[in-house]
Amino acid sequence: MAEEGDRLYVVTADEISDRRRALGKLLIWGSFGLLVAMFAVQWLAQAGTLPIDFASWRPTLYAALFWAVCLNVAQVVLYGERGKRTLFVLPAALFVIFVVVFPLIFALSIAFSDWNLASIDGRKFNGFDNVVQMWNDPFYWNSLKNMVYYTAAILVEYAVAFGLALILASEIRARKFFRVAFLLPLMLSPVAVSWMIGKSMLEGRFGPIARLARTLGWDRPAFFSEPEIARAMIMIMDAWTFIPFMMIMLLAGLQAIPREVQEAARVDGASGWFGFWQVTFPLMLPVSITAILIRIIFKLKLADIIITVTSGGPGGATDSVTSFIYREYRDRSNVGYGTLLAIVYLVLIVLAITLFMKLVDRWMNPRY
Amino acid sequence: MKVEIYNHLQRTGKLSRRNMLKGMAGVGAMAAVSGAATGTSVRPAWAQDSANLRAEILKVPGVGMGSPTDADWQKVGEMCLGPTREVVQPGEFEGVELTFMGLNNQNLHNFLFRGFLKPWEEYTGAKINWVDLAQADYNPRLQQSIATGTVDFDILEMGAPFEGDTAGRGLLDEMPDWVKDLIDMDDYVDYLKAPVGTWDGKTYRVSIDGDTHTFAYRKDYYESEDFAAAWAKEGDGSPWEPPKTWEQVNAQTKFLAGKTDPLTGLGAYGYLDPLKITWGGFGFYFLGNRASPLAKHPDDPAWLFDPDTMKPRINNPAFVQAIQDVMDLVAADAYPPDQLNADPNTTAFQEFLAGTGGMLNWWGDVGSNARTSDTSVVGDVVGFDINPASDRVYNSKTGEWEDTRNESPNNAFIGWGIYVTKNVSGDEKKRKAAWSAAAHLGGKDLSLWMVAYPSGFQPYRNSHFQYDEWEAAGYDRAYIEDYLGSNLDSYNHPNAAVEPRIPGIFQYYSIAEDELAKAFAGQYGSAQEVADAIAEAWEGITDQIGREQQIALYKGSLGL
């Protein structure tokens, strides 16, 4: 049957000779050998074993590209028509390996190194020293703790976004205007939001919100001096920027629900709240989960507003993992440790998101 | 000169065509005596030419005639080619290509250099390729180039604090003697002379800028009869006058909290410490202002580390006192609300200049902005002085306090300079070309134009402080004298605190800022605890970068 199936698609009947097969294998292994040899030569030259002075690692890069081309060509040489089919996927797969997998491996090797850019000795492998340092680093744990607070705030953002989406989905006046108006914050750069709101409107002496607070009886308004208030302010500014994103996704979901469903519920005697809670909300769950998931991913990258407005203060109360790594890496040139922190954060994110999706899957598709 | 100062002077009419023409007649004479007046060694053969030249270049485009353009920069570059012509033949560098890495802040720095060097390129035949960097990208680009062995520039605009990273690693080319003669290094203000710009006795830097923190205070606070009367009741018995020591600063700051500002009618405050000190390393300078008179002993060139061991001094009694003073003021609620979120920029430009707070330390531009910025309300009531002294000084060698008054201005950052990298060392023609370009930019006459017109650079030569020359060119005498006087006193102070030019110095500052921010937010029980935490982190950085190397480089930077 397989052969019959193949007949449907194979245009040319390839007769692959032994000689051609040998040429194909030679292409692959020959170019791979060249790559390994070039890498070895450069490695030894860098270690000082060979008296050759390479300006950069480009020769190895060129050898790798040559190997990739040979690997692709060899597919056709070796397998003919079937090899051509492979070419639809292989270049893309190689590209992914080159730009994702290799850098990740390189990042891992840096993460387990002592590499301060100011050190004359350069990079030194230091085993698990960076992990131990991380374990004992109160700044990192503090920023992780803050991330838990920031992520938890997404539930409130979700509730607000759902409410706004419901309003915009209903027959209100100037609906189109409000849709655009509610989307505006999303169009602003978080850095612009930081300056307009965090550093201007919330400015303690002349900012309009501070003036209003004084009018309302708060003598010395200070929005970034108490840890809880400062963290709340960061949350509010971030929420203001990104609630429209969740809102627009939820609005699209609401509009996709057929009107008949609500009408049927109403005919069956469901009240407004009952209709929402028992009909609309469950139907919206898949969209909601997607919106929350994407929002969590956005939130885990939170750094710009914090760096611009508080630099992580007061005393680290608003620090996010990203803003802390930014200081560690950029201000202190501590490449090895900074990379380890980023890798650990990546692992934590992957684990947390996987767990979240599993739980959601179990909740939405209960297995009895 | 800073752009905003220049623009404001034009707007407010402090520069005028009439003033300029009136004064111009005196320029030649004043400039002619400037060398003698400053004791600088202008070569006799050049003296008259130079005097005329200084008068002539100040006419391009003319004070009060609008902001200079590229055509003006080229013209000035052409007029100042004299020293180059003395040592370089026309077309001598034909075929030489140089790469110049510098900043593009406010469309100045490299933009000016391009104009100044255009006629130099035409005369010498060399070609320059430019690498322009934003300030924020500068340090990462430099560090990555060094760490990855990809120093791809021949000439470098660089701040002196990075000399440890570059000269300390042997990446710079030593300045030839003919360059030293050409740029008249004796004219530099004292603190820019060796050891700044040198390593192991070798000179690497052509200075084009100077930096220091100076003390600004509100004169109207001290003219207020209400404050004087209240101080007589509540104060420590001392007269109500601008503070001369940090002890007085602290006492007056506590006293002023809760009073009413005579200018704005809002709350009065004393000294403004930027409590959001996390500022990429630059925030540490502000603790340095408080600490330097306590920690910088006149008999000891070091003050941040022990030069023999690199043991941090940040947790010695002097620094602990400085930190404790800030913590005490936080506890006394003596700062404006939300001061914990006030970084140095906010403290200077949104608070002090806007009328909040009575005292401040900052670089030269706050002094000038006070008079020239549209958002400043304190222009007529601001006074300047050097960094306050302290009533005692800690001697790290004996481990004892000494009850003697100690002054120590904090010359924070040291300013920009032009350096030549080792890339050119193997090619004598290229090397001479690179140094010739650097000498052209750091030339004495060209430098006068740079500090008189918008350039981003502060005065840094003794000859820049000839107020008559400025007045003759059309500037307001009182303004210029006020603006520059406190800088000059700080630059030339015998016990000025100059920062260590060692690799990674901003890493030390940055981690200290993180810990200090926690302390100011009340997360540490005492100043000693936070100081010990900083010291521990500094030891970690020293070990990571390499202790022996740091010791050697620190000693080198101190000229020991």
Image (cartoon, coloured by chain):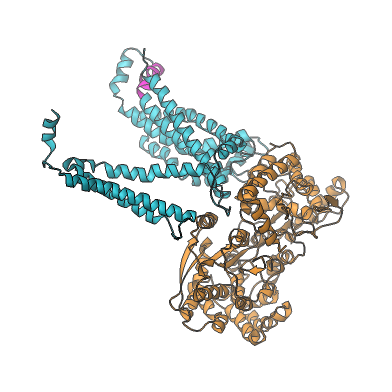
Does residue B90 appear to the left or right of B526 in the view shown?
left
Q: In this view, does B195 lie above or below A224?
A: below
- Residue displayed at 66% across by 78% down: B472
Q: In this view, does B208 lie above or below B472?
A: above
**Magenta-colored stretch includes residue A281:** yes
Does residue B484 appear to the left or right of A4 in the view shown?
right
Q: State whether residue B454 appears in this view.
A: no
The chain that appears orange in the image is B
Quadrant in the rendering for residue B207: bottom right
Does residue A192 appear to the left or right of B293 in the view shown?
left
**Front in this rendered view, residue A47 or B54:** A47
**Front in this rendered view, residue A319 or B149:** B149
- Residue displayed at 36% across by 28% down: A287
Q: Is residue B493 above or below residue B79?
A: above
The chain that appears cyan in the image is A
Q: Where residue B238 appears, x then y in whole percent?
A: 87, 52
**Front in this rendered view, residue B426 or B25:** B426
Q: Where residue B479 appears, x then y in whole percent?
A: 68, 67
- Residue displayed at 76% across by 43% down: B324
Q: Where residue B58 appears, x then y in whole percent?
A: 59, 77
The magenta-colored residue range is: A272-284
Residue projecting furthest to the right: B237
The overriding secondary structure of the stretch rendered in magenta is helix
Does residue B381 appear to the left or right of A331 in the view shown?
right
